[in-house]
Image: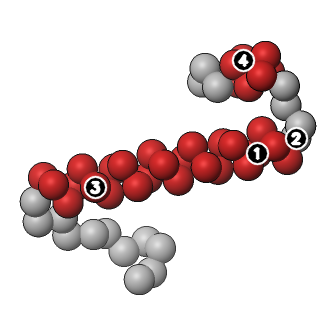
Amino acid sequence: MPENEVLDVKTGHEKTLIERQIEATDRQIDALVYELYGLTEEEIGIVGGW
């Protein structure tokens, strides 16, 4: 599926599932970036409040 293709969500349940997947992926990316830059818990707290 192309990155820019818009999904045709048929139900509220499907929308909720997709939103949860996006949120989980965002958290994984954040964790990887924090690890990559060697951030402390304090620094993560500061940048995590965006």
Q: Position of residue 47 (x, y in %)?
A: 71, 24
Q: Looking at the image, is 28 positioned above or below residue 4?
A: above
Query: Which residue is the site of mark 3?
Result: 17
Rounded to the nearest angstrom, the CA distance separating label 1 from label 2 is 6 Å
Numbered badge on residue 33: 1
Q: Which residue is mark 4?
A: 46
Residue visible at 36% across and 74% down? 5
Label 2: element kind: loop
In primary-sequence order, the first of circles 3 and 1 is 3
Q: Amino acid at mark 3?
A: Leu
Above or below: residue 34 compared with residue 43:
below
Q: CA distance from mark 4 to mark 2?
A: 14 Å
Q: Which residue is mark 2?
A: 37
Residue 13 relative to residue 40: left or right: left
Earlier in the chain: of badge 4 and badge 3, it is 3
Quadrant holding the N terminus: bottom left
Please report the residue visible at 69 percent of the width from the left and 19 percent of the height from the top.
45
**Which numbered disc, 1 or 4, marks the residue that appears first in the sequence?**
1
* 45 sits left or right of 27 in the view: right
Residues at marks 3 and 1, CA–CA distance in whole angstroms: 24 Å
- Residue 48 x, y percent position in the rendering: 64, 25
Residue farthest to the bottom, as pictured: 1
The answer for how far apart the CA atoms under marks 4 and 3 are is 29 Å
Discs 1, 2 touching: Cβ within 8 Å: yes
Q: Gap in Å between the C-alphas at discs 1 and 4?
A: 14 Å
Q: Are marks 1 and 4 in contact (CB under 8 Å)?
A: no
Q: Dot 1 lies on which element?
A: helix
Q: Give, as a three-letter code, the residue at label 4.
A: Ile
